[in-house]
Image (cartoon, rainbow, N blue to C red):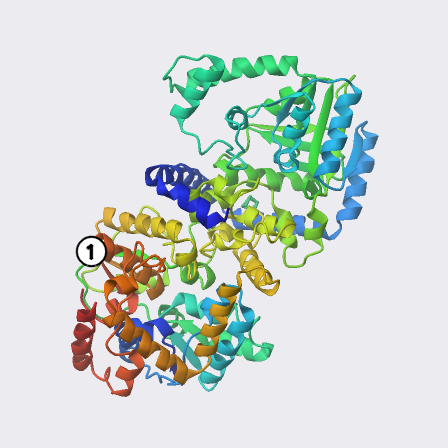
Amino acid sequence: MRVGLFIPCYIDQCYPQVGLATLQVLRRCGVEPEYPREQTCCGQPMANSGCVEAAKPVARHFAETFAAYDYVVGPSGSCVSMIRNHYDDLLDDAAEQQRLAGKTFELCEFLVDVLKIDRIEGRFPHRVGLHQSCHGLRELGLARQSELGPTATPQVNKVRTLLQSLEGITLVDLARTDECCGFGGTFAVKEAAVSCLMGRDRIADHQQAGAEVMTAGDMSCLMHLEGLIKRDGAPLRVMHVAEILAGNQP
Amino acid sequence: MSHATAAAEFVADVDRARWHDRALWFVRSKRDKCAQQLPEWEALRERASLVKQHTASRMAEYLEEFERNAVALGAVVHWARDAAEHNAIVYGLLKERGIQRVVKSKSMLTEECGLNPLLESKGLEVVDTDLGEWIVQLRHEHPSHIVMPAIHVKKQEVGELFHEKLGTTAGSTDEKYLVGAARAELRSKFLAGTAGITGVNFAIAETGGFVVCTNEGNADLGASLPALHIASMGIEKLIPRMADLGVFLRLLARSATGQPITTYSSHFHGPKPGGELHIVLVDNGRSKLLANEELRRSLNCIRCGACMNTCPVYRRSGGHSYGVTVPGPIGSVLYPARDMQAHKSLPDACSLCGSCTDVCPVKIPLHHQLLAWRKTLVKAKVTPWHMRAAMSVVGGVMARPWLFRLGGKLGRFALRWSPRWLTYNGLNPWGAQREMPPAAKQTFSKLYDDGIGHGSARMDGIDKDQNKLD
Ligand code: SF4
C-alpha cells in the first residue's frame, strides 16, 4: 500500500508540527507514508473564490504529484473535500478525477474507514472541546450533522471516536455542536466583521464548556480561532487533532 | 452598499448582533427537535425535492391544468410577466371597483413586486395584517426575514412603537397587552377593508385550489370578510396533486418555526358565495431560473426561512444587510440572477459552511449554488479585477513548486522580522482583530528532508521547539 502524505500549503509553512504529528500517527498505525516533495496546494483559495481558471493548473499539478499512490492522506477535511468534491470542474479527465477522489482521505477518516482503527494508544489528561470543521462534517460526513434527521448516516463521529479512546481525556459538551467558526477562506478577510464575531462566539462556547484545549481536524479553522484567542488573551490552547493523537501535550 | 459593509455596521453593535443571533438560534433549535422526532425526516425531504423537481420539469403543463381547474371553480386567473404587470393587474382590479382600502396577508411576493408603495401612491390604504409585517410597516421598514418579518425588533421597541401609534401605555413590554392592542386595531382594519390580498403557499394543479398557511388566521379574515380576494402567487408555488400537499405541510412549519403544523392551513377553492376570487400568476424572473440548469432547484423553495435561521452570517448580520426582500442563503442565490452587478456581494456573504444545504426541507444545494455564483461572477468579470488578478498570481505560484517554496520563504521571513506596524495596519483586514498565523522557523518539507519525524523521541524534541515559535 503506497500512501502519499498530503500536507496542505499553509500547514507546511506555518504549522509544521501538525505535519509531523500526522506522519507520526500514520507510522504508529503501521503505515509508512511518502511525502512527495513537489506538492504545493489543493487550489482551494482560488476555486472557492470562483477563479476556476486560476485553480486549474494547481489541481493538475496536485493530480500529477499524487498519481502514483494508492491513497492520499492529509490532515485537513477542507482540502480533502476540495479534491473529492470539487475537482470535477478543474480536471478535464473525469476518470482521473474519480480515481483521485476515491483514494483521497482525511486523516481520521483514513484511520477509521480504511485502516479500521477505532482506538489510539496514548494519554491526554485534559478537557478538550472538539470543533467540528464544516467541510469535514458536511462534505466528508465525518459525523452526522445536527440538521439532519435521526436516521441519516453516518451514526458515528469518526474524530470523536478516536479522541475518546485516549486515556484521561474529557471531551466537553458544547452548546452548539457543529456551528461554523467563521473562517471560510477569503470570507475571513472579505467579511472580517462577521467572521471575527463568529469566531469569538465559537471560542466562548468552548470556554463556557470548560475546555482547556480546542481541537479540530482543520488547522485553517484553528488558525483563525487562534488569531482571536491570542489577540484577546483567552486562556485556551488550540491543537490539531493529529497532534493530540500523536501524543503531543499542550 | 455591499453586504460586508452593511454587515459590519450591524455587527458594530455587538450586543444587538448577539441578541439577534440567539433569537434565531432558538428557532433553529426548535426546528432541530422537530426534525429529530421524525424518523422519516430525510425521506420527506427527498420526496419534497423530487415532487418540486418533477413539477419544474413540466411547469407549463401543470400551470395550464391549474388555470383550467381554478377557472372551473369560478376564479379568474391572470398572468403577470413581471412585477410591473402584477401591480398593474392588482391596481386595475381595485380601481374598477372603486376600492380604497386593502388588507394584506402573508405575501412576500407583493413585497417583491413593490405593491404597497404603488397602491399608496395611488391614494389607497394598505394594511399588512400579519403582526410582524404590520410592525415593520408602522416603522416604515422592510421585513428582515421572510417568516418573522420583525425579528430584528426588540420587545421594548414594539412597546414604544405601539405607544406612539396606538396610544398603548408608555414603557409597556407586556406581550399579551401589546398583542391585544394590535388585535383590536387590526380587527377594525379587517372590517373596514374592501379587498383582501393574500399570498399562496401551495397551489394544486389537480384541483385548482390553493393553500395559505398562517399562524394568526389573518389570511382567513382578510380573504373572507371583503367581497374581493386577490391571491398573488409565484409560478413555482405549484404542486401537482392534493396527495402531495401533506409532505409539504409537514415540512414547512417544522422547518420554519419548529411547530408540527402551522395553526391555520386555509384552503381556497373558488370564490366565496357572492364574492370574487382573482389569482395572479407571477413569473418575474422565475422562468429564467427554470431555464438555468445550475440554479433550477432554487425554485424548490417553499419559503420556510430555515436557511436564514441556521445561517451563521445571517444570524449575526441581520436581514437588512442583504438589501433584498428575501435575504439569507436563498436570497443570495436568487438575486444575482436578477441583477449580477447590483447583488454581486451576496454570494460572498457566506463562509461555505453548508448548514443551509442540510437544513433545507426541499434539498436545495444552497452552498453549492452560492459557489456556482462566485464562478459565474468571475467569468462575467463582475468580480473586481484585483481579486481575479490576485488569484491568478497565487494560482501561478502554486502550480510551480520552486516558486511556492521561494514565496513561502520570503513570506515567513517577512512575517518573522517585520515590525508590527508593517504587518498590522489598515491594509490587513485579517490583523485588525486577529493575530497573524505563526511563521514557522522551518517548513514541514525541510524537517521531512532532514529526516526529523523518524522516531518519536526526536520528533517530540522538534515539536516542543516548534511550539516555542508561537
Ligand atoms: S431555500 Fe430551503 S431552507 Fe431556505 S427558505 Fe427556501 S425552502 Fe426554506
In the picture, residue A76 is in which quadrant?
Answer: bottom left
Q: In which quarter of the image is residue B196?
A: top right
Residue A102 sits above or below residue B62 on the image: below
In the rendered structure, the residue with mark 1 lies on which chain? Answer: A
Viewer-closest of B232 and B83 = B83
Residue at 79% over, 34% down: B78
Given residues B292 and B421, the one toward you in this image is B421
Q: Where is residue B236 in the image (x, y as percent from the top left)?
A: 68, 44
* Quadrant of ligand 1 in image: top right
For residue A181, say whether it is visible.
Answer: yes
Task: Give the position of the C terminus of chain B as an image quadrant.
Answer: bottom left
Rendering coords of residue B195 (x, y %): 70, 20
Q: Where residue B178 appears, x then y in whole percent?
A: 44, 17
Which residue occupies the foreground of this view, B365 or B50? B365
Residue on which disc 1 sits = A212
- Which residue is at a point 32% across and 84% down the rendered structure image? A32
Position of B68 relative to A69 (above/below): above
Looking at the picture, how far across and down is residue A56, in whole percent?
53, 75
Q: Ligand 1 closer than 8 Å to the CB at disc 1?
A: no
> Does A86 sit above or below residue B446?
above
Count the labels in the image: 1
> Secondary structure beneath disc 1?
loop
Residue drawn 17% across the image and 73% down it: B464
Query: Is residue B239 rendered to the left or right of residue A109?
Result: right
Estimate how packed mark 1 is, as few (under 14), some (14 to 19) or many (20 or more) residues with alpha carbons within 10 Å.
some
Q: Which of A201 and B81 is in front in this view?
A: B81
Query: Given the image, on which type of amino acid does mark 1 rest?
Result: Glu
The image shows residue B387, relative to residue B98, as above or below, that is below
Report whether residue B38 is seen.
Answer: no
